[in-house]
Image: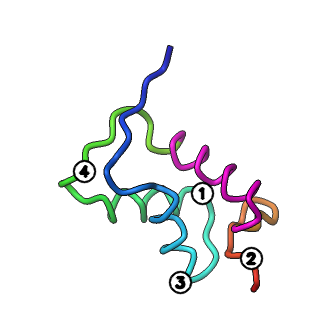
Amino acid sequence: MLQMAIPTIPIDHLILNQLARGEMRLLALVVAVRRSLGRTEAVKGDLSTIVKSALRKLVASNAVVDVEGVYSLRAQ
């Protein structure tokens, strides 16, 4: 079974902060989240998988829109 460490800063908040700056593709989000975590937060496992999972949850909750792999915040 795959186990992932849960960082103290929720990934979904980091994703929402990045998307507040504009729309992004998955790779750009993974890089931005990694930079946001810096060296203080250690994430065990594949960060790309963790970000994908968080994005699926955000899309399902209607907080984020996925248009052909480009993610953006849902218009209020």
Q: Nearer the viewer, mark 1 or mark 3?
A: 3
Sequence-wise, the earlier of marks 4 and 3 is 3
Number of other residues with Cα within 10 Å of mark 1, as a class: few under 14, some 14 to 19, many 20 or more: some
Spatial separation of the CA atoms under disc 4 and disc 1: 20 Å
Asked whether 76 or 73 is in front, the reply is 76
Residue occupying image coordinates x 33% and y 65%:
36
- State the residue position of label 2: 74
Number of other residues with Cα within 10 Å of mark 2, as a class: few under 14, some 14 to 19, many 20 or more: few
Q: Is residue 65 above or below residue 74?
A: above
Residue occupying image coordinates x 18% and y 54%:
40
Q: Is residue 37 left or right of residue 60?
A: left
The secondary element bearing badge 3 is classed as loop
Query: Residue 31, located in which quarter of the rendered image?
Result: bottom left
Q: Is residue 62 left or right of residue 4?
A: right
Which kind of residue does numbered mark 2 sit on? Answer: Arg
Sequence-wise, the earlier of marks 1 and 3 is 3
Number of other residues with Cα within 10 Å of mark 3, as a class: few under 14, some 14 to 19, many 20 or more: few
Whether the residues at callouts 1 and 3 have beta carbons within 8 Å, the answer is no
Spatial separation of the CA atoms under disc 1 and disc 3: 15 Å
Question: What is the count of numbered marks?
Answer: 4
Which kind of residue does numbered mark 1 sit on? Answer: Leu
Spatial separation of the CA atoms under disc 4 and disc 3: 22 Å
- State the residue position of label 3: 21
Residue occupying image coordinates x 67% and y 58%:
58
Q: Is residue 68 left or right of residue 71?
A: right
Sequence-wise, the earlier of marks 2 and 4 is 4
Residue 44 on image: x %, y %? 33, 34
Q: Nearer the viewer, mark 4 or mark 1?
A: 4
